[in-house]
Amino acid sequence: MTGSLRAFVLRLVLVAATLAAWEALVRLFSIPAFILPTPSSIFIALYRGFASSLYIDHFGITLVETLLGFALGSTLAFALGVTVALSRRVEYFLYPFIVMFQSMPKVALAPLIIVWFGLGLASKVVNAALVAFFPLMVNTIVGLRSAEEDRVNLMRSLAATRGQIFWMLQLPNALPYIFAGLEIAMIFALIGAIVAEFVGAQSGLGMLIQSMNFTMDVAGQFSVLLILSVLGLLLNGLVVAVRRRVLFWDPSQKIEMAPSNKGGAS
Amino acid sequence: MRVAPTGAGGRDVIAVRGLGKTYGAAKDAVDALCDIGFTVAEGEFVSIVGPSGCGKSTLLKILAGLMPPSDGEARLNDAPIIGPRRDIGVVFQSPVLFPWRSVLGNVLLPVDVQRLGRERMTARALELIALVGLAGFERRYPWELSGGMQQRVALVRALIHDPALLLMDEPFGALDALTREAMNVELQRIWLERRKTVLFVTHSTSEAVFLADRVLVMTPRPGRIADVLKVDFPRPRSLDVMTTEAFGSHVRRIRAALNAGGGLE
């Protein structure tokens, strides 16, 4: 359609104009490169990083840390969320721990995690899992408890067992909450991995930012930030794609989908 | 002056005796139901009519085994109802369909729960879906259907496992008046074809009379049966029956019973 094409072209022009204005202002006022580099120098840094395969190696490491942390954190969060949601007794005894951990900024644990799990992959995965854990656990609990009374009564009137009520009603009913939790967990896992790399690491994009900071390579840092935001978009897109397939029946999907259809970033 | 609250002839599917339900305890206790007694014969269609708060939904919950009574007992095919049973079908006020299941999937829910075998029951499900006029909609999802269509799916779901008893709790209460009348005619047609024993709860006097062989009139505080009347218009009844004098006198009698019981303000 011509209308949406025009809007798309307009959007590209706006981005190009912003970059041009940035470039011009930095050159006009001779802003030093260690304060604000020009877009052109950022793109050159980006090109060099990829040409030397430096960025690709570190990108791969951060990606693996994030995905493993996400998998570990969300598996544990789902399992514990189900246990708590189904058993009031477990909830009663775990509640103090949950509240304590929930109110604590999880990234503050990163230095301890490095001490316990070393400078390698394990500490990044554990930290990513820890940060990703809570949003999903809380959403799992809320989702499993949100089944409408009428629906539960229907299942009970059919003489359904507790297990059947869980598998046929509570779990599918909780999926919108669980996917909302997974989306947050994915981005949180990336944050957890980067923070752990800041604190102590031999590789990864977070470590790269840290080392570039020491050498005042600000253009390089900008180029890595660009990679990180693309990585975040890709990871989020992965969860959203799965969610759309699984939750085709959820009416709130359609409302949410409309604006993000045209490649808008969150 | 009271007609015996029992069905004429036939084996009793439901027998309720001295049934009472009290919510809360001691001085805060509220009597929802008091000394309810009636029977429903096999293949009979009985309506229970009463205003909101007369305990008719409580009664249905007890019969569905979702809630124990405080006094007395309810028997289904001569066995006391002490918990949910597999031989009862329930239609609620809202359709209560699962949005992640298609029309066919929703209809097969009791089959899945009671492990009756999808292969064996799918043919029956398709036949029942066609019976309520939803052929061609099997693969659709609930949000693609109108309110009346959704309630038809709920009806088929309640019939799929061939229950001995169908409990209907104001199933058409959420529909507009025209759809509601159409659904009443539909329900009668389906009932004539399948001859299930039906207990139908409503707050509409005309709906109760139109559908039922017998009408139990309930009044609130505490919920009890104030009157029982037999309706013997020939079937199938058309909506025109509602304009006859005999129909009007039934409705007037129900209103009188409700008024005397303080059911209507």
Image: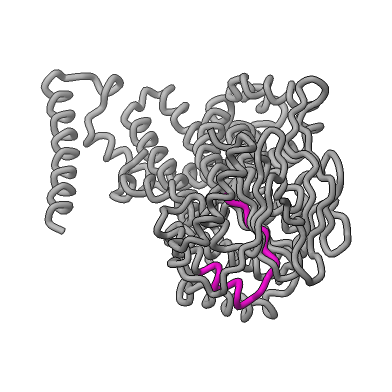
A27 left or right, relative to A72? left
Q: How is the image coloured?
A: one colour
Asked whether B14 or A211 is in front, the reply is B14
Q: Pinpoint residue B16: horizontal percent, then vertical percent.
A: 81, 53
Asked whether B33 or B243 is in front, the reply is B243
From this view, report whether residue A199 is shown above or below residue B195.
above
Q: Residue at x 65, y 40 (%)?
A: B219
The answer, for residue B109, to whether it is visible in the render is: no
Q: Quadrant of residue B233?
A: bottom right
Q: Residue at x 81, y 65 (%)?
A: B12
- For this orientation, the residue located farthest to the front is B1
Q: Residue at x 38, y 45 (%)?
A: A256
Q: Pinpoint residue B120: horizontal percent, then vertical percent.
A: 69, 80
The answer, for residue B123, to whether it is visible in the render is: yes
Q: Pinpoint residue A89: horizontal percent, then vertical percent.
A: 81, 32
Asked whether A185 or A32 is in front, the reply is A185
B184 left or right, relative to B212? left
Asked whether B165 or B221 is in front, the reply is B221
B115 left or right, relative to A192? right
Q: Pinpoint residue A251: horizontal percent, then vertical percent.
A: 44, 50
From this view, report whether residue B240 is shown above or below residue A144.
below
The number of callouts visible is 0
From this view, report whether residue B249 is shown above or below residue B188.
above
Q: Residue at x 34, y 31 (%)?
A: A222
From this view, report whether residue A5 is shown above or below residue A87.
below
Q: Is residue A27 magenta?
A: no
Q: Which residues are magenta?
A: B186-202
